Image (tube, grey):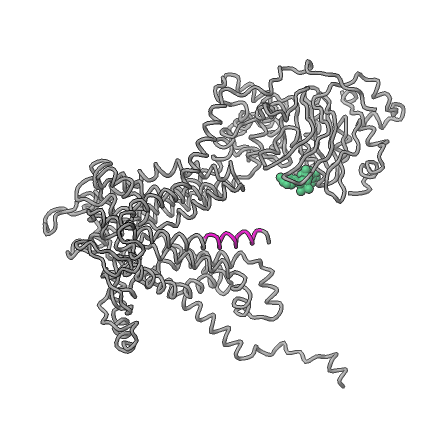
Amino acid sequence: MASEERTPYDRALEPEIRDVSIELSEPPPSTAIEVQNLHFHYGRRKVLEDISIDIYQHHITAVIGSSGCGKSTFLKALNRIGEIEGNVNVAGSVRFFGQDIYDRRVNVNRLRRHIGMVFQRPNPFPISIYDNVAYGVRRLGRSRVHLDEIVESALRRAVLWDEVKEDLKKSALGLSGGQQQRLCIARALAIEPEVLLMDEPCSALDPISTMKIEELLRQLRSRYTIVIVTHNMQQASRVSDYTAFFNTDESRIGRLVEFGPTVQIFTCAANSSTRDYVEGRFG
Amino acid sequence: MIPSRSPASETLSHPLDLTQPDSKTRWLETAFVLLAWGCALLSAGTLFWIARVVYQDARPAIAEFGLEFLWGREWSSTREVFGALPFVYGTLVTSAIALLLAVPFGLAVAIVTSETILPQWVRSPVAFLIELIAAIPSVIIGLWGIFVLVPFLMPLQRWLHETLGWIPLFGSEPFGPGLLAAGVLLAIMILPTIAAISRDVLLAIPPELRSASRSLGATRWETIVRTLLPAGSAGIIGAIVLALGRALGETMAVTMVIGNAVRISPSLLDSGYTIPAILANQFAEALKPIHIGALMYLALILFGLTLVVNVIAVVLVQWVSRRAIVR
Amino acid sequence: MELSDRELPDLDLQQPLSLPRRLFEYGTTAIALGLTVVALLPLFAIFWQIVSQGLQHLSLEVLVALPAPVGMEDQPNGFANAILGTMMMVGVGASVSVPFGVMTGIFLSEFAGGTAIANGIRFAVKILSSVPSIVVGVFAYATIVLATKQFSALAGGFALGVIMLPIVTLTTEEALKLVPDTYRLASAGLGEGRFSTTFRAVIPNALPAIVTGVLLAVSRAAGETAPLIFTALSSQNWPQGLLSPTPSLSVLIFNYADSPYREQNALAWTAAFVLLAIVLLVNTISRQVTRKHLK
Ligand SMILES: Nc1ncnc2c1ncn2[C@@H]1O[C@H](COP(=O)(O)OP(=O)(O)OP(=O)(O)O)[C@@H](O)[C@H]1O
Ligand SMILES: [Mg+2]
């Protein structure tokens, strides 16, 4: 079981298969989100410059980089949620299965149902656990027949069901931080997104809860495409298949320095600043 | 080095329809947005609506009397002669008395409730009680004014007249209600405004300023007088101007204790009239269009006067709070 | 000698402040405390008078009976009609101001936050809140009384609504701004639109504070007199619907206070007691609502 669940990093640790060319021999993954020459501004201030990345379907992509280099902003550009916080300007293209999400005709609400998001701090609504998971499902004019099933299945996929099945009507605020974060994941899963964006989902959690979420990520990998921002190098190497390293300089404009299979970024990065960063030599 | 991608929409489990609107909620969204805009514009528009309506109905009087209305001293509906000066005079004089009294008291309360002279368990109730005055309906304060304050002030007024009667300010025989009584009552009513806002201003001053002054050896009151009050001056002035606006427009309590006599007397012990008071007393009975017009003209003057004062106050207070955020 | 002086300066830690500074310190403290005590006196005097005078004639009778004609000693005498009239007109005012005020608050907080148009509208609403209530009365007189040729509860209620509107608007905006952005993000992240996000994720969390604002507005409107004197006028009978002159507690107090009849003066105090009780009760409840929420 464990041997099947290996990440590229685990394999990288074994000398005999350290050769990166083995990765290349696998069938090429398909692209869920294709980011091309993305420039992102908050008002007049440029935050991201010329980012081009492919987010592969059913893989986990980690985004790492020092504080303020625009990782959260990058995630917010992928489901256009930056727009509700204020005035943003975007140039370049972000294609979700071929469709430009910045097209004027795009219904952002529909987009965000395809690309779910989990935030840094667990943010359950102050209502019951059940209602939290049902929040995105319950909409005007939808049949509610399968609601119970949907809630249960989402909670199971978030590996929270066994802990809360007795207390579905209790307030979500009574859960521990780790449980709240898994609840937020269940809430996002309940509307069947294709992609899950996670912004430092474990930074407010203890090591045990962090382990649980990481395990959960590995399980979700087969059905969902995941982009996770993390400050934790070990976490990135443990859970992700691909890693993108962002960096910034005095101009405070974030740029993509390197992107590739996680094993490659962590063992033989092409760029010297990437090597410094993953080995903890700066930042 | 990175595997080439394949165009892969077909690998998606369900069809992708990003541009399709959610038909069921779209009208709701649109209606909601329009409604919010409509309500916001209407709420803000009420201010202009008031100005327009009052101006419209004042037009007969404006056409008849012009600007001379402002210094006309007579007011008679039978002879259809109308002048605003006695009312403007009464309004300004009572407000001035109120400010003169309320500013020192209000500032004292603000300082006592924001500094650490008294323990917290005394300070908070004092602040709460002072603000409670603001919640008392003004007609009740007027009732108290008629039956308690005016008799209470009578000996004081008599004494003022007897000892300082040679000054025109106290030159008339007191008979109870009058400008002074109205001013005192107004002072009681606007005191919470000055106290509460000044207190907030003082509390918002960065604590470093206080410790800096104290560490240089200044005493508590030297710090208050030379550092805190100047630092908060814009906000405190804003509070005072806001209180002035409130005093100018206050109706009931003043109407009940000012004596309601159309005259311009230099003596504070004499009775008088204010714009709000004449509006309250005569509007219900006014029948002639020119009479209504004259009252509307007065209302317009009051509206303009308070508008200017309140705009200044709001701008001052806003400016202060914005500066506090930046800092 | 000089050197050692410098090395060991004359430490004067024990020496008290100079006399003028000490006097200034004690003097100002005494003055400030004295002024504060005097500032509190009117409040206690008002409460004392209203309770002592008001309770003398408070009975069930005054709360359920109509005003008796002057001089009729044996008839039941009260102001039940005024209590009802006040409630009616405050109700009209609330039904006008709450929807508009809450929607405007939503607009300011959720739609236009920080934009020039929002600042302009907020400014206008703030100025509206400081328009003298007598001018609002004149406005209601001109728009409704002159148009319907009738003093009415509608005109009075409309005037009260205009007075409540800015209070509801500004407290709603404040309440919504206190809701953490994470709720908005969570909801938008699930693909919910503005309507759904506002009404399902934001407003439920702000509801206690919005209710507080509405109750504050109600307590303010219940005590208003100036906007009612020449819009709703007054009457000795039960309110006859929205389109006829309607009595109110505050106008009754005003009329009875000026009355030459002693029993009406006495009843003014009783009515003042009832009105103050209502106003302070609503006021306190409103504070309670938010306090509970914060726990
Ligand atoms: N709403 C906003 N308006 C203006 N500037 C913003 C906004 N949000 C972020 N920024 C700026 O954009 C830059 C990138 O911010 P971002 O939050 O994306 O960084 P980050 O990489 O996620 O940092 P961290 O690791 O600390 O979370 C920062 O310099 C920040 O100041
Ligand atoms: Mg971040």
Task: Give the quadrant of the C terminus of chain B.
Answer: bottom right
Name the outermost residue toward the right: A16
Q: Is A277 in front, or is B36?
A: B36
In this orientation, does residue C100 appear?
A: yes
Q: Is residue C88 at least partly visible in the picture?
A: no
Q: Quick check: C133 left or right of A65?
A: left
Residue A31 lies left or right of residue B304; in this view the side is right
Looking at the image, which residue sits at the far top?
Answer: B10
Front residue of A12/B279: it is B279
Q: Position of residue B181 (x, y in %)?
A: 29, 64
Q: Is residue A254 magenta?
A: no
Q: Residue furthest bottom?
A: C1
| Percent coordinates x, y for residue A101 in the rendering | 64, 25
Q: Main secondary structure of the magenta part?
A: helix
**Identity of the residue drawn at 45% across and 63% down:** B107
| Magenta part of the chain | B314-325
